Image (cartoon, rainbow, N blue to C red):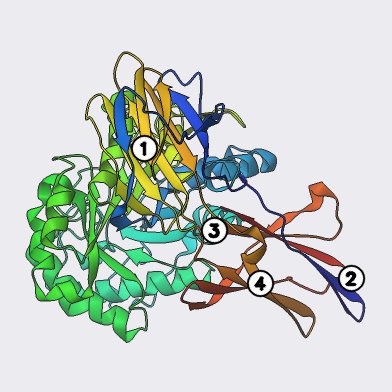
Amino acid sequence: MTMDFTLRRIAILGGLFCGAIALGETEVEVWLTTESLDVTLEQQEDVLFKDDGSGGGLIVDIDEDTQYQTIDGWGVSLTGASSWLITERLSDAKRQEVMESLFGPTGIGLSMLRQTIGASDFNLSTYSYNDGEEDPQLERFSIERDREYILPRIRDALSINPQIKVMGSPWSPPGWMKSSGDLIGGTLLNTHYETNADYLVKFIQAYEEEGVPIYAITPQNEPGYSPAHYPGMILTKNQQIRFIGDYLGPALRTAGLDRVKIICHDHNYDGLDIPQAILSSSASEYVAGSGFHHYGGPIQAMSTLNSEFPEKGIWFTEGGFGEWNDHFDNIVHEMIEIPRNWAKAIVLWNAALDQNSGPSVIGEDNPNEGMLLIRSDSMDQVSYNGQYYYLGHLSKFVRPGAVRIASPSWIGDLETVAFKNLDSSVALVVANRSQSARRITVNWRGKHFEYEVPRRCMITYQWGGNYDYTSVVSGLEIDPAGSDFSVRFDLDTKQRGPMFNVQKSGTLNERDWNYMLPRRVATEVGVETWMVETGGAVDQLFIKINVWP
């Protein structure tokens, strides 16, 4: 559609859709990654459901009527280290390629970010947003340190997928709020509970002023651990109950930010008594649920918590991989078992690290790996680790808003997890951890297909759905205001939790398209209204809205 206003022209190019076309009910897409990574998220030949006969091997019954948790998304952390590497060690073209591979439709379509509030161990240096002498009124508060590398990369991700959910987690409040007087060690002083709550409110407000909406926060990263070489802080369960119930929850409510979820615990499975205590306390009214890490204890702790507090959500908020746990069996097992144990999300740790597992304030002697390896001693040298592809078997096919449905699993052999997207398409993720191929028969709605799953691999099968591309974007409205124009449109979120982005160009030359960062201005049941601004007076402007399932 083309609209003419005096000397300026804006053309809205709707219906330029990316991704796979909706599948018929009998067609099944098959995507494969092998342990050796010789094959990585490559589409195989489709298979067909059969109406008659019966199959052999392991029987995988897909039961859409037995439903579990709703999925929030799948993500990673653009830490200071990751953001620096992506900014300083990639050319503009390579940076765009990498960000597309992480967040775009041709990549793995990540839909969550967990961002550090201040510095973590993976930064060039340690800092908070209010360093220096005691400042109870937070007059020195500033996120300036994040503006150089971190915020630009978050905005890049949001321009590729504006529906990314951003979670914030602090490693430490300013040192003057703590018993140690430092970012490292100590605990929160009784005199600064309210100050710390105000500090987190200011973080949310400052980031949202930068165009980064905050979906959730955790009060403290790993509150049961006090690291010796990087920011951290001990908060006992009783301290957390007091901080959330008496200060943080009320502060968010007073600031009109009670839409921001509070996720408690944000630590390992083996600290289960901590979220149990918090969710049993008066602080529970402010808490959306609990976050878990995988550095200690059994995954099944999340199922235990869900059985006790089914009304509260569970998120897997941090999973790092490295020398101690980067083998195939461990990663694919977690990709299957974490959602099977009620997690609404999987968020992995560093998006990228260099050849020395840095940059990091703890130096080069650490065993961590990023989702990507970006060399810091040269330009544009990028490789993708297994965690990128294995998480991609979920994130590329299971959209936000999907619900986990019932499927069997044989732990240590053939493991499965299944989901139903909002458009009724089904994704079945299978990991074969055995040393030999496994024949399976997948039963669904009275039909079945057979498949020989290769040894030591991960596969996603996807089928069905009634995704109607033509009705996703509607309500286009162009508003000339002063020297600028804004464009509003409605997005239907009932079908598949569709992802979209907006691009602009002064011409129709393919190389001239650039991303725009839209803002969500209204939300109703099943419909979101978004707005983009043209960014100045133009003689001609083309705007393209891309939607993918």
How far apart, in angstroms, are the residues tagged by discs 2 and 4? 25 Å
In the picture, the quarter occupied by the N terminus is bottom right
Q: Earlier in the sequence, mark 3 or mark 4?
A: 4
In this view, the mark in front (3 or 1) = 1
Asked which secondary structure carries label 2, the reply is: loop
Write the residue at 87% across / 57% down.
Answer: 507
Q: Nearer the viewer, mark 2 or mark 4?
A: 4
Q: Secondary structure at mark 4?
A: strand
Q: Secondary structure at mark 1?
A: strand
Q: Position of residue 497 (x, y in %)?
A: 49, 59
Front: mark 2 or 3 = 3
**Mark 3, secondary structure of its residue:** loop
Q: Which residue is mark 4?
A: 474
**For the residues bearing labels 3 and 4, Cβ distance under 8 angstroms:** no
Spatial CA distance of label 4 from label 1 is 37 Å
Residue 75 spot, x, y in % from top left: 42, 49
- Label 1 and label 2: CA atoms lie apart by 57 Å
The answer to which of marks 1 and 2 sits earlier in the sequence is: 1
- Which residue position is annotated with label 1? 443
- Front residue of this view, candidates 407 and 191: 407
Task: Inspect the image, locate mark 4, and give the three-letter code of the amino acid beneath it.
Answer: Ser
Vertical order, 502 against 248 (above or below): above
- Between the C-alphas of marks 3 and 4, the distance is 14 Å
Q: Earlier in the sequence, mark 4 or mark 1?
A: 1
Residue receiving disc 2: 539
Query: Residue under circle 3?
Result: 498
Q: Amino acid at mark 2?
A: Asp
Report how far apart the C-alphas of labels 2 and 3 lie in the structure: 32 Å
